[in-house]
Image (spheres, helix red, strand yellow):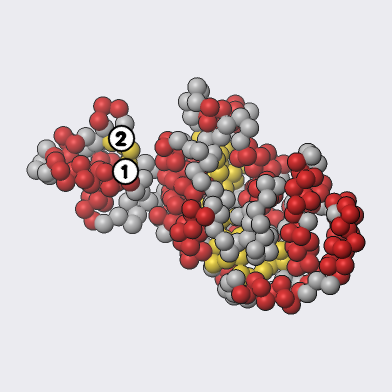
Amino acid sequence: MTGASTGCADCLRRAWLIARLSGHIERAWAARRPLPAVLSLADDELIAALAGEQRRRIAREYDRFDAALARERCVDCGLTAICRCAPHYPQRLRDLPDAPAVLHLLGRADRFEQLIEADGVAIVGARRATPYGIEQARGIARGLAAAGITVVSGMALGIDAAAHTGALEASGSTLAVLAGGAERAYPASKRRLHERIAASGVVVSEMPPGTPIRRWAFPARNRTIAALARLTVVVEAGERSGSLITATLALDLGRDVAAVPGLVTAPLAAGTNGLIAEGARLIRGPQDVLELLFGADAPRVPGNAVASGLPADLRALLERVGSGQDTVAALTADGLPVDAALAGLAQLELRGKVRRTTGGRYACLS
């Protein structure tokens, strides 16, 4: 299925129109016009409402739209197009009043239906995240992926990228929803992560290939993230964070929302602590997420989730830290050279498996 395009002409035309009017939608959004109201308009209404002096020209382009050319461009970019007329279009997205007309998929499109039918969990949060937030997002995603849960996020800097990375570390499933074309990494600094997600999971966008990035496309992307997931977990968010938009959208769709707590004095914890104060489930690790999803029947996070993908010497060192030998002195008491212990701990820190705490102790990350 990868590289094949199955979108119908009407849906492909709608996706083209959204991209063609992207600058006009940007101005409407900046003027605080509700995005769902704009994206819910029929094609002719959208042109009339937004195109202004260009509406006749855009209407002519609309009438001349070439669906075959759009499909060919998708194939050239390695994308699969699934339109909302298709029976395998995600049922969860149909809950949206402004559901994307087309999903452009990069990667394992043959696994997309399987991934979205699973109990997906969205993990979102601040771009300028703290080391604590990165550790939490990565550890929660790693544990969930090891338990067979699909991790959904937006591949942004900070929490999003950490969540995808954690899922990949457990050789699990992850799905990235982008604001621009699925064929291009955004941000560009995450090109390698983009490649890794496409190799084992799926990158998704409602935008046709080559669509420029616009600010309004990020809240539009957030609605797709919220709709695809059964549960949204927020890890670090300021009082006006875009992640809170995703949480609000999830609540509007009847989905569960949870949050990882932070220091009450930390600005990046204001949003997450606020969600918890308003009734969101407090998340301490992946097991809390599984219990929220499945209740008393929740599976246990596999015991080897943290050690997944490590060479034998680092795995053994990690197991010793987890068993209570959590200082350099304890690790070297039975003859392990100090240099080897320090080098191994440094590697484990870089891989996000442990972090140094007070008193020179090390703690395993979930």
- Disc 2 packing (10 Å; few <14; some 14–19; many ≥20): some
Amino acid tagged 2: Arg
Residue ranking furthest to the front: 53
Is residue 252 found left or right of 266 in the rendered image? right
Q: Residue at x 46, y 47 (%)?
A: 162
Residue 347 rendering spot, x and y as whole percentages: 28, 47
Which residue is label 2 attached to? Answer: 356
Q: CB under 8 Å between callouts 1 and 2?
A: yes
Q: Where does residue 228 sit, x and y in percent of width and height?
A: 64, 53
Report the residue at 61% width, 29% height from top.
239
| Frontmost residue, 121 versus 108 | 108
The residue labelled by disc 1 is 349
* Picture coordinates of residue 71, whole percent (x, y): 69, 74
The correct choice, above or below, for 253 with respect to 4 in the image is above
Quadrant of the drawing holding the N terminus: bottom right
Name the residue: 60% across, 61% down.
182
Q: Quadrant of residue 61?
A: bottom right
Residue 94 in sight from this viewpoint: no
Q: Quadrant of the C terminus?
A: top left
Say whether residue 359 is left or right of residue 143: left
Amino acid under disc 1: Glu
Residue drawn at x 57%, y 61% is 184
What element does badge 1 sit on? helix
Q: Is residue 359 above or below residue 246?
A: above
Q: How many marks?
A: 2
> Residue 44: where, in percent of width, then height?
89, 59
Is disc 2 placed on a helix, strand or loop? strand
Question: Is residue 346 visible in this depiction of the protein?
Answer: yes
